[in-house]
Image (cartoon, rainbow, N blue to C red):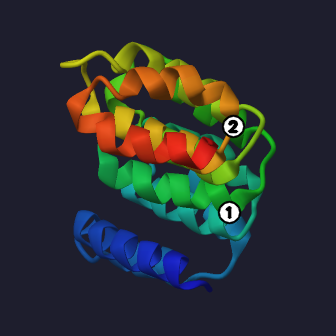
Amino acid sequence: MDSARDEELRSLTHRLRDEAGGSAEYERLAATEDREVLAGVLTEAGRPLWARELAAFRLGCAGDRRAFEALVLLLNHRDPERCVPAAHALARLGDPRTARAAAALATNPLRTAYALQPVRLLTELRAPESVPALISTLAPLVAPGGPHPRVALGCVEGLGLLGDRRALPVLEAALARPELHTAAARALRLLA
């Protein structure tokens, strides 16, 4: 287990243990190595969100694609505490649908306020969908005083890391937004 996954799992298990009230069912799901048991949690009616989240995270990190739908739903959750582990597990899942799903979430104008983790996931995936989705998400956010500065900053940083010159116009426009100026200038240097 790598240290990033270790840290994500520690943070997730601490939060979910609290949500589950330290139940025996929580302890059983946290300890099991049986993927069939974990997959069953995703399909059984009446399971609490904490149980579905724990099962999806563990399956996703193990590369089990049965977790895909649950992880995408969690990536789209309004609570960042649920989005971060979902993005982490999706990045490790290896499902070819992941980039398309992250791009759809990032570019949905009704969900822009919650798009930070899909934006970061697109950057990590470096998929063909990544640059067009980040450009599309950032374009309406670059005006001074524009909304969602954290999402805009995530797009700027991601576009710099991805190094695709198609991002030049939107990064140049981002220079005008004071809270994006430094990151946009750094991204432009990376593209030069």
Of circles 1 and 2, the one toward us is 2
Q: Nearer the viewer, residue 24 or 136?
A: 136
Label disc, if present, on residue 160 of the rendered structure: none
What x and y, as percent, mark residue 111? 39, 22
Q: Amino acid at mark 1?
A: Arg
Q: Going by the image, does 29 lie left or right of 79? A: right
The residue lying at 23 percent from left, 36 percent from top is 179
Q: In this view, which residue lies farthest toward the left?
A: 145
94 left or right, relative to 177? right
Cα separation, mark 1 vs mark 2, equals 23 Å
Q: Residue furthest right?
A: 96
Amino acid type shown at disc 2: Asp
* Residue drawn at (30%, 15%) of the image: 143
The vertical placement of 168 against 50, above or below, is: above
Element marked by disc 1: helix
Q: Which residue is mark 1?
A: 92
Residue beneath disc 2: 164
Question: Is residue 71 at least partly visible in the picture?
Answer: no
Q: Quadrant of residue 56?
A: bottom right
